[in-house]
Image: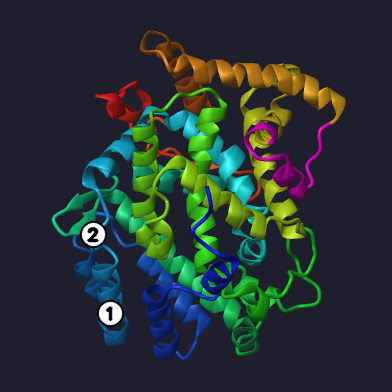
Amino acid sequence: MTSPFTDAMLNNFRHQGDPLADEVIDAFATQFDSSIQLLVDKLINMIRMPVKGEILESIKEYFPEDEEIGNTLEKYFTQAIVVPAWADAEKLSRGAHVFQDHIFSSIMILGCASLPTTYVCQPDTKVLGFTRRLIDDAPKRLVETAQMVTDVMGEKGLFVQGTKLAGKGVQSVLKIRLIHAAVRHLMLHKEKLASEHNQPESNNYLLAYVYDSIQEQCDWAGHIKPNSWNIKTDGVPINNEALAIILLTFSYTILRGLKKIGVKLTNQNQEAYIHSWNVVGYLLGVDEKFLTEFTHYEKTEEIYNQVLNRRRGNSNDGELLQQALLGAFSETASRTIPFPLAQLLHVRRVARLITSKLISKESYVALNLKLNFYDHVVRFFVWIGVRLFGWLVNYRFLRIFSNIVFSRIAKTLWDWRKDYPDKNLKHRKKGHYQPLIIPYTLTKTSYLSDK
């Protein structure tokens, strides 16, 4: 099977941003004379907009004095949710049910395959390295990512309502899209912004990163000055080719991971799952030329491999991101399991070993991860356990055992159960973060996708 995209076409996508979201951020910059402090303050207000209620009412509440910004926001939130002509409500619902049937396995694959894959994509790691958020507080960012996925793919997370897309996940994705546009603006104008402002206060993290990124001595993880962004060769930050591969790490990579651990899905369920994420991609600003080609597993796989091969590479930022991610897994596991038992079970190795099975050998090497002989021995037994869980979920009368194990792990490590919605967990590095909240109904075996 041949990909419908040529290298020339993909090169053009590298220079394509997101006009609808960029217009909102440009309005901010114009209104406040590129004042990064006001820009950040206003963005924080926007991000905190309530999920429930009318979004247009929220805009008027948060931006009563900013007519131009209010108009661009109204245009953004109105146009972004119009249902695309190719969207299929039945597939959208079935795709969400596939996720709900395999929620714990999917989140494991998210952490051990989807995120590591994004860390080998070049020059995209420059963006992730620039914001430093995943490095500075990896556990919090991992929980935020898993929460977004759960919001979108959970029950009533995304559905068609008349001519509009609705659900809890819609606003989560649209906020992320605006954050992408804000980071794109900061990266393209960082020298100008940093020269106009003094050393930022520590609580203004976005400006701190902007200021730090142009200094010879950086106080970042690794203490290495980030690589500069070159528009001519790199395109625009968070461009459409980058968004396409990011989207596929949430759709195709999850399906591939489920297949690798032994979960059996029908072609109909695979296509529905890809379709659901295509609708998410539409909300995220991915060009529809991509989305209409992501139709079934084999074709999507071909495009995924093509784009990943163009972008795969090693970088200091990618290595730092992956080490921070593995550190978050190890720290959480070792904090939960008593030391002697943790050492016996090799909990600090498990995430790295599972990652080595779920991503390609080329990507594993690009992350500068290595396996010694002892790792191979331990991985053999770890993978038997993972495959056993994958096998159990294929049979209704056996799945109860894997569900019990997964739900206990979830409850122990991150308080995923709805019974603990207000409990704060303290990370040893800094601050507090909310636990990942998965509705209790999603911890049960439902087999909704097979009804």
Q: In the rendered image, is residue 121 in sight?
A: no
- Find residue 126 and report its image quarter: bottom right
| CA neighbours of label 1 inside 10 A, class few (<14), some (14 to 19), many (20+) | many
Q: Residue furthest top?
A: 397
Badge 1 marks a residue whose secondary structure is: helix
Residue of label 1: 70
Q: Which amino acid does the dot numbered 2 rest on?
A: Val
Choose between 338 and 109: the one closer to the eye: 109
Q: Which residues are magenta?
A: 356-371
- Find residue 30 and report its image quarter: bottom left
- Colour style of the rendered protein structure: rainbow
Residue of label 2: 83
- Find residue 447 and report its image quarter: top left
Q: Which amino acid does the dot numbered 1 rest on?
A: Gly
* Residue 340 within the segment the image draws in magenta: no
Percent across and percent down for residue 31 are 39, 89
Q: Residue furthest right?
A: 373
Percent across and percent down for residue 49 are 31, 62
